[in-house]
Amino acid sequence: MRHLIDIRELSVEEIDELIATACDIIENPARYSEKCRGKKLATLFFEPSTRTRLSFEAAMYELGGNVIGFSEAQSSSAAKGESVADTARTISCYADIIAMRHPKEGAPYVASLASSIPVINAGDGGHNHPTQTLTDLLTIYREKGHLNDLTIGFCGDLKFGRTVHSLINAMSRYSGIKIVLISPEELKLPSYVKKDVLEKCGIPYVQTTDLEAAMPDLDILYMTRVQRERFFNEEDYLRLKDSYILDPKKLTNAKPDLRIMHPLPRVNEISTAVDSDPRACYFRQVLNGKYIRMALILKLLEEAAK
């Protein structure tokens, strides 16, 4: 049974295939409107989500399928103490594919070991978020026309940001990539990501605390919020939450074709004054999430049927 728990489980060729399918869905939506007729997606969300959960649901509905599931742990048998493995076994009796979000790292992997249907990791703690990464890759491709030869700046919470970790893993397999890591000292990219991904793959990178100094070199600026839910200490969160706020002034020396991305939700790390800048593509990024999830659902269901 094929699952998607970590973006590294997909080859570059498979990622390119998913992007091609998503682009075809955008161009020819009617061709795909009945592809999942009679199929059911189960959305098992043990922590809050807006974009990821609703984009999975919209994706399945636009493929002609149906959706069942829950949007918080308290509305599931997890509140009674049911294990993730038992939940997965149970849901396998009702649905054809699962999208799971869980606050504990590794929970979707545990579910995949017990499930008899494909499991998609829709985010597990601070670990992985592979469908957001696919969303990001489709967005970069549609905005820049390629995934090679880019300088990408990641700004904000690089320590706990699962979207950052996943995208760095994915982009490390493309040629001509340079990475700029912009964060306060307390939220630097974990050393294991630098060692196991960037250094192992020979990706040039620099670390800085100065967003404005880094700006002129960037082709992509990937902003992230400082995540309150990942902190054990409220004082640390309050001290760091406003470390970087992107506003029009900070974009003065940016490239005309820079693209500004954000996995959302935004708190105040991007001023609303930036929204009207054509370089801001975070809401286009949201829409791309639906299309790439449609492509992924199709791929996993087709492979399960073989």
Image: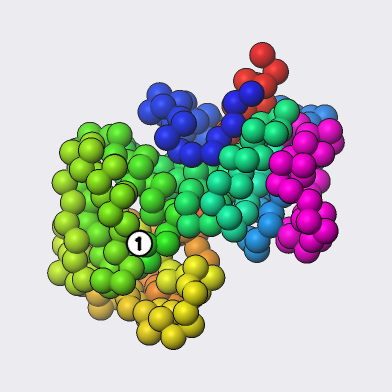
Q: Quadrant of the image for the C terminus?
A: top right
Q: Which residue is mark 1?
A: 158
User: Closer to the camera, 107 or 68?
Assistant: 107
Residue 48's place in the image compared with 2, above or below, is: below
Residue at the top extreme of this rendering: 306
Q: Where are the magenta residues, as a range? A: 68-97
Q: At 33% from the left edge and 78% from the top edge, which residue is drawn?
A: 243
Residue 145 covered by magenta stretch? no
Image quadrant where one finds the N terminus: top right
Which residue is found at the position 25% from the left and 78% from the top? 249
Q: Position of residue 274 (x, y in %)?
A: 38, 72
**Could you say whether the residue bearing mark 1 is in a helix, strand or loop?**
loop
Identify the residue at image location x=65%, y=63%: 48
Q: Residue 98 location in percent, x, y?
A: 70, 39
Q: Is residue 46 rendered to the left or right of residue 92?
A: left
Please provide percent x and percent y for residue 86: 77, 42
* Horizontal and vertical percent position of residue 94: 84, 36
Q: Is residue 118 visible?
A: yes
Check disc 1: other Cα within 10 Å, few if <14, some if 14-19, many if 20+. many
